[in-house]
Image (tube, grey):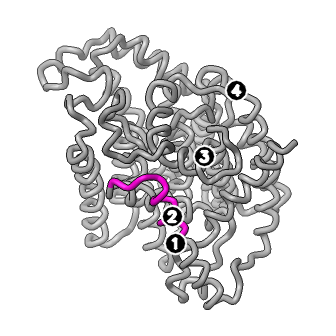
Amino acid sequence: MIEIFFILTQFFIIYFLLSFNVCALNKEFFKFYKLSLPENIALNSIVFLNFILLISFFNLDLYIIISSYFLYLFSLIAIYIYRFKSLYISSKDNFFYFILLFITSTIIFLEVSNNLVIGWDAQKFWIYKTLNFYNGNTITNLSSLENPWYPYLGSLSWSFFWKVSFLEHEYSGRLFYVFFYLSSLLLLINNFKFSNFYKFIFFITLILISYDHTYQANWSMFSGNQEILVFSLISIAMHFLYSLSKNEAKLENLNIISILLICNLLVWIKHEGFVFSLSLILTLIFFFNLTPKKKFYIFVFFLGTIFLRFLIFDYYNLNPDGVYHAGFEQTNIITMIEKISLERIIIIIKFLSITLLSNYLILIGIFLLLMLIILKKKLKKLFYIIFFALFNVIIFCGIYLITDANLVLMLKTGIDRVIYQFSPFAVIILIELYNSRKVFFK
């Protein structure tokens, strides 16, 4: 009973830590735009993850990282009290979103606490990085662990919420993954132009669809593996891309900055993040009516992100052997060309087709696009999201094509997780179709 109480308490701890928005520093912001609860949590989560990542670069232990974030948080609270005379900016739908988030979080929190499974990848890579920070070590000590070249941000957030908890069990840190996942889905649902009742129905449906028990049985969404964090970040990025597509000039900079911060996070969570980040950057540059100056800054920021990633890893000797991913030791042009064959291409297409058709979100997206093509409707409004999806599919197929490892084994154990991570794009197709149905079906 006490453990259940502490599990519920963990929800409020996470919620409190992600409630105060840095946009309060600009009091003009709240004059023209009221953030919904999902938008507020999404922005704060992005800032939180970037904050603890940045602090970790200074080789500080978890206690100082936590203390630094609390200092930042209390500064924001003081600004809220001074400027708004309140700790919360009210919105008519926020209570609805809060109840929905609390109930669904509680249910999955209890499932995680009763299913103490650490995924295979988490056992091999992530748990040791988590323990490194939890036990008071810094980024320097990561070089002494097995597979130091793997990113560490997901493990850092895991250890952060494990430490900031009344629970002594490591799963308390993974409850943040649940909260982040549900918040990202709420953010997507918030874009639909229908009543709260239908948002509730669609939210539950989306959880059931994305909470695929086929994947759960194989690698468990909340078992410490990092795919769920990437999925959630991509969901949030899709929201900001959709917001940009509506050409709201006042929010353009906020949307762009948010996407750029997400790109930075992606490369510090998983190696696949490099591809996902590039796909988001190219989507911004090619498909949105931004000034050439902004497009230049966006690309420079992306290059800076990649440079910083390699600089930090080199400075702290986190990649002493020059290995960037298992299974890709021979990466010169000649060996890559030698690996390309019709047989390997057919194998990849086979596994790709099976995976695409077994992922419910992807299946919905494919069905909607085929329906529009059959009805001979213009797809221009969806070009940005189609490009994002195709770019990721093509690049990852190319990566599998040049692997040194057993191709079939790599596809069996990895392609479903890769596809899952960027599958939230399908929800945006549905949102675009529903909210712009007069455009598509006139």
Q: Which residue is mark 1?
A: 71
Give coordinates of residue 388: x percent, y percent. 43, 46
| Residue assigned mark 4 | 213
Marks 2 and 4: in contact by CB < 8 Å? no
Q: Quadrant of the C terminus?
A: bottom right
Task: Using the image, determine if residue 207 lies above or below residue 338.
Answer: below
In front: 32, or 322?
Answer: 322
Residue drawn 42% across and 47% down? 266
Amino acid at circle 3: Trp
Q: In the image, is 393 to the left or to the right of 163?
A: left
> Which residue is labeled 2 in the image?
67
Helix, strand or loop for disc 1: helix
> Which of the 4 image quadrants contains residue 363?
top right
Distance between mark 3 and mark 1 Cα atoms: 19 Å
Determine whether label 1 and label 2 are within 8 Å by CB.
yes
- Looking at the rendered image, the disc whose residue lies closer to the viewer, 3 or 4, is 3
Sooner in the amino-acid sequence: mark 4 or mark 2: 2
Could you say where residue 4 lies in the image, as x and y percent from the top left? Answer: 82, 44
Mark pair 1, 2: CA separation: 6 Å
Give the left or right position of residue 127, taking residue 390 as reference.
right
Name the residue: 82% across, 61% down: 196
Q: Amino acid at mark 1?
A: Leu
Mark 1–mark 4 distance (CA, rounded to whole Å): 40 Å
Magenta: main secondary structure equals helix
Callout 2 touching callout 3 (CB < 8 Å)? no
Label 3 element class: helix
